[in-house]
Amino acid sequence: MIQVRNLSKSFGDIQAVKDISFSINKGEVFGFLGPNGAGKSTTINMMSTILPYDNGTIHIDGYDIDKDSNKCKQLIGVVPQEISLYDEFSAYDNLIFWGSLYRIPSKVLIQNITNILELIGLSDRKNDLIKTYSGGMKRRINIASALLHKPKILFMDEPTAGVDPQSRNRIFEIVKTLNQEGMTIVYTTHYMEEAERLCDKIAIIDNGKIISQGTQTELQKQSNMKEMVEIIFESISENQLNALQEQLTIKTIKNENTIALECDVNKDLSKIITVCNNNNLKVKDLEFKKVNLETVFLNLTGKHLRD
């Protein structure tokens, strides 16, 4: 559905996007995950024809974005970070205005607006002025305005920025519903839980480069990380520690009474407990360290996402 090859963009001496390549299949939710300033918005703005690029190629549904810009625009909807609404208009009038720009026939537009307001849960507030809306409600109308012409592809640039948990969950539901109906969605975020919850594939981007991309399982394999179990004993002698080292792979020793083991928790836990019992070790506490998107990100980038 989307093919991007060797894409680059600079602003003066700052290289915002550095020779990135990726493909997005029809019907996927593809996420760009990275901190602020990583190049997410620049990338999505180039893909949605908003921003020209310096080098590379972008194809959308077989069309070259340079040669067939108008055809590409007809295929896509864009939900920008900024709220693009008129405060003194009602939600309904905002949607009528934005829909008119697509030259949608009046009867079709009115029906589309009715359906979309139902989807985003704001049918009962459609005649209220935008200035009376909460931040989350404005975000949902912002999404609605990008759906009026029924695009095949929806670009969403941090659509939950600054919204409350209830509104965030409603936006998640909207994304899932649209995707279930067949829409391809490109989604940028700096929230790992959003990427984990919504995205079929994820590109981890930092300093303008894609560090790794794939499904969450593929990202985990690429990071070479394994699950760990951390065990705190009431006490452990040097002889007992040596015995454990002979029988188990000890990754780290955090302090004199704590060990951490790389393992497959489902397969290896019973063996670990047996070895501890055989060496007369009393377990005070035990904690599993699962591999998740956060640990993969830290392993690949060496820093926290919100640094």
Image (cartoon, grey):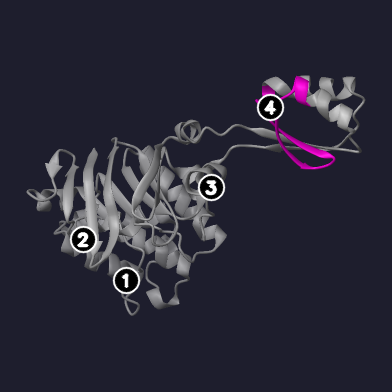
As measured in the structure, the alpha-carbon distance from the residue carrying label 2 to the one carrying label 3 is 32 Å
| N-terminal-most mark, 2 or 4 | 2
Q: Which class describes the residues within 10 Å of circle 1: few (<14), some (14-19), or many (20+)? A: many
| N-terminal-most mark, 4 or 3 | 4
* SS category of the residue bearing label 4: helix
Q: Position of residue 166 (x, y in %)?
A: 55, 58
As measured in the structure, the alpha-carbon distance from the residue carrying label 4 to the one carrying label 3 is 21 Å
The reply to whether the magenta stretch includes residue 119 is: no
Q: Quadrant of residue 272?
A: top right
* Residue at screen point 59% across, 37% down: 291
Is any atom of residue 146 visible in this view?
A: no
Q: Which residue is identified by label 4?
A: 265
Q: Which residue is identified by label 3?
A: 298
Q: Say if mark 2 contacts mark 1, CB within 8 Å.
A: no
* Amino acid type at mark 3: Leu
As drawn, 116 above or below 240:
below
As measured in the structure, the alpha-carbon distance from the residue carrying label 4 to the one carrying label 1 is 50 Å
Q: Which class describes the residues within 10 Å of circle 2: few (<14), some (14-19), or many (20+)? A: few
As measured in the structure, the alpha-carbon distance from the residue carrying label 2 to the one carrying label 1 is 18 Å
Q: Which residue is identified by label 1?
A: 85
| N-terminal-most mark, 2 or 3 | 2
Side of 131 where 77 appears, left or right: left
Q: Nearer the viewer, mark 1 or mark 3?
A: 3
* SS category of the residue bearing label 3: helix
Boundaries of the magenta span: 245-266
As measured in the structure, the alpha-carbon distance from the residue carrying label 1 to the one carrying label 3 is 37 Å
Q: Nearer the viewer, mark 4 or mark 3?
A: 3
Q: Position of residue 83 (x, y in %)?
A: 35, 69
Where's the N terminus, which quadrant? top left
